[in-house]
Image (cartoon, rainbow, N blue to C red):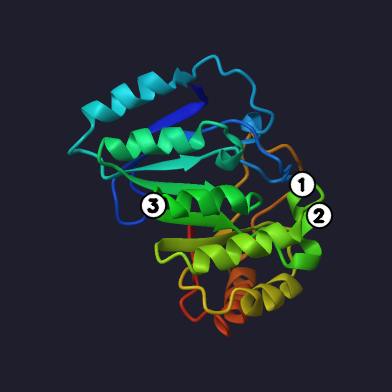
């Protein structure tokens, strides 16, 4: 198994913990605003590391790092994800999973095995706008299953939406609020352009627009926040 990328220290990716972030290749979405688009089709990385090298690194970081964030790409596509997480947990680390929620059966298996301490699920848009923002046909029943499973999981979690102009509109957030009603954590994240983003012409929303969207969300999710700006 190849680890496509490793950020050796992050104070942001795992809320409240010092952590490293592991990036796995491959994704079943084609979001036009993706920051990690080079990982989408899981090319063989020239600077990747093996699973054994990752575990050796983590062995030396016991007592220095609290946890490991597993991101991508879409980690639930990785055939060895469960074994990788077991190996990380055996070293004493907490594990946070980033996911697009498209594989609820994988999430269920990890939760049932008590292998996750935190889940962050991307909410791409309102259901009627989901496929445009995700860039592919989306099984919305699977997305719905993942949302409800995560909310009922008993572990720490968050939902988050990267807000991109012109992909999102006020109606998205008027729909997302009631859709996620009862969720304990939701964040709006303004899009930030990078060289790796595959689509030109995308932009971050203005502060005024973000606040307008947040106000709509907070009608149903009073703890919702803006992150990253």
Q: CA distance from mark 3 to mark 1?
A: 42 Å
Q: Nearer the viewer, residue 7 or 136?
A: 136
Residue at the (26%, 45%) spot, across then down: 66
How crowded pointer 2 is (Cα within 10 Å; few <14, some 14-19, many 20+) is rated as: some
Q: CA distance from mark 3 to mark 2?
A: 34 Å
Mark toward the start of the polypeptide (3 vs 2): 3
Q: Which mark is residue 132?
A: 2
How crowded pointer 1 is (Cα within 10 Å; few <14, some 14-19, many 20+) is rated as: few
Residue farthest along the top direction in this orientation: 46
Residue 136 visible? The answer is: yes
User: What residue did someone put label 1 on?
Assistant: 201
Q: Nearer the viewer, residue 208 or 175?
A: 175
Disc 3 versus disc 1: nearer the observer: 3
Q: Nearer the viewer, residue 206 or 65?
A: 65
Q: Quadrant of residue 131?
A: bottom right
Disc 3 versus disc 2: nearer the observer: 3
Which structural element holds mark 3? loop
Q: Are marks 3 and 1 in contact (CB under 8 Å)?
A: no
Mark toward the start of the polypeptide (3 vs 1): 3
Q: Position of residue 11 (x, y in %)?
A: 33, 47
Residue at the (47%, 69%) spot, across then down: 185
Mark toward the start of the polypeptide (1 vs 2): 2
Q: Quadrant of residue 204?
A: bottom right
Q: Position of residue 159 (x, y in %)?
A: 54, 62
From the viewer's perspective, tell me whether residue 186 is left or right of residue 136.
left
Disc 1 versus disc 2: nearer the observer: 2
Residue at the (74%, 45%) spot, across then down: 32
User: What residue did someone put label 3 on?
Assistant: 114
């Amino acid at each position: 198994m190849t680890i496509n990328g490793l950020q050796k220290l992050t104070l942001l990716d795992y809320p409240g913990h010092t952590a490293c972030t592991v990036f796995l290749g491959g994704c079943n979405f084609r979001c036009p605003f993706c920051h990690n688009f080079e990982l989408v089709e899981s090319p063989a990385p020239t600077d990747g590391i093996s699973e054994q090298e990752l575990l050796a690194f983590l062995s030396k970081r016991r007592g220095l790092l609290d946890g490991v964030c597993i991101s991508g790409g879409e980690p639930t596509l990785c055939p060895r994800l469960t074994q990788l997480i077991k190996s990380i947990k055996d070293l004493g680390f907490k594990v946070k999973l980033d996911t697009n929620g498209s594989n609820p059966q994988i999430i269920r298996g990890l939760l049932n095995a008590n292998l996750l301490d935190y889940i962050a699920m991307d909410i791409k848009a309102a259901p009627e706008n989901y496929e445009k923002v995700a860039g592919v046909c989306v099984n919305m029943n699977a997305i719905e299953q993942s949302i409800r499973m995560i909310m009922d999981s008993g572990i720490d979690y968050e939902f988050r939406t990267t807000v991109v102009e012109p992909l999102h509109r006020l109606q998205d957030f008027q729909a997302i609020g009631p859709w996620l009603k009862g969720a304990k954590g939701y964040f709006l994240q303004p899009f930030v352009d990078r060289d790796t983003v595959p689509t030109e012409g995308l932009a971050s929303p203005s502060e005024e627009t973000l606040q307008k969207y947040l106000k709509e969300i907070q009608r149903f999710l009073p703890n919702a926040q803006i992150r990253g700006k």
